[in-house]
Image (cartoon, grey):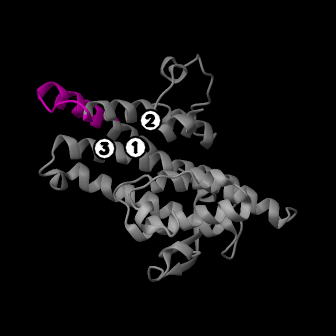
Amino acid sequence: MLINCIRQGKPTRQLEVGMNWLCDTTEDDPLAYLTHCTIELPSLMEKTRRVCERQRNDESMADMEALIERACHLEATMQNWAASLSDEWLPYTTNYIPEKPVDPLNAEEWVGPVHGFNDAHKASVLNKLHSCHMLCAAVILNALEWLRPYDYPMDDRYIHTRWIEQRTIDDICSSVPFFLGSGKQRARTPDQMNTIADLIGGYSLIWPLHAAASCPRISKDQWLYIYGRLAKIAKECGLEQALLISSEFKDRSVPGA
């Protein structure tokens, strides 16, 4: 439910009142702790969207500053938690792609490092972190663009958060070969059939890639790479929901769209 709320940027009543949820909020269970950290994200996304629809005046600007402060706190929490993870959770580089692909729509790998992981579960949790981190950064950036329409690029918060946003998108792209089995590793255990591994890897990538593609500041080539990987998942894994995606680039950039 939380992932669906984050994807839509709309909290449910159950999330807002808490439902008396029992959740391990210690860092011993990374996935549970990540859930605890991000439970506020859908509400922040919705509140920021609503303020952006209001007329810019002293009251609405004060409301937006408060939302930015809260989003910055949430972003710092996720960043600090990621920095505290043990080495077994960290990805390692299996290859390095020095240049952008000539045909990003059909490329297997994006420019930069290609990441491997100790197992598929850790890779999936890290991608959930990257997705939530990126969407939290987007809240801050969208809010600053509304708050300071003429000089937001000069705001230190904007400069720092834009770097965070791009880094998390790049990290998601770096994990794609691992999940789709096109690199030196694949997201499976030795006793799993390739078909099952492909299904698990493809399914695990859908939401992170959708989150990355939703960023309005992403480059055209990187968006095409992400769309191409979603198309591959839809075709080879039979997961047609991978292509339920919208973007300003799609109609003019994807053949047959």
Residue most extreme to the right: 191
Q: Is residue 85 left or right of residue 200?
A: left
- Say which of 227 and 87 sits in front: 227
The magenta stretch is 52-70
Say which residue appears at 12% left-offset and 29% top-offset: 57
Image vertical order of residue 174 relative to residue 69, above or below = below
Question: Is residue 251 highlighted in magenta?
Answer: no
* Label 1 with label 3: CB-CB less than 8 Å: yes
Would residue 91 be seen by someone viewing this image from the given angle? Answer: no
Would residue 31 be seen by someone viewing this image from the given angle? Answer: yes
* Label 2 with label 3: CB-CB less than 8 Å: no
Magenta stretch, main secondary structure, is helix
Q: CA distance from mark 1 to mark 3?
A: 7 Å
Percent position of residue 204, x then y:
65, 53
Q: Residues within 10 Å of mark 1 (few under 14, many from 20)?
A: many
Residue most extreme to the front: 256
* Label 1 with label 2: CB-CB less than 8 Å: yes
Between discs 2 and 3, the one toward the N terminus: 2
Where is mark 3, residue-wise?
140
Where is mark 1, residue-wise?
136
Corner quadrant of residue 61: top left
Percent position of residue 137, x then y:
36, 47
Q: Which amino acid type is marked by label 1? A: Cys
Where is mark 2, residue-wise?
41
- For residue 217, which numbered disc appears in the image? none
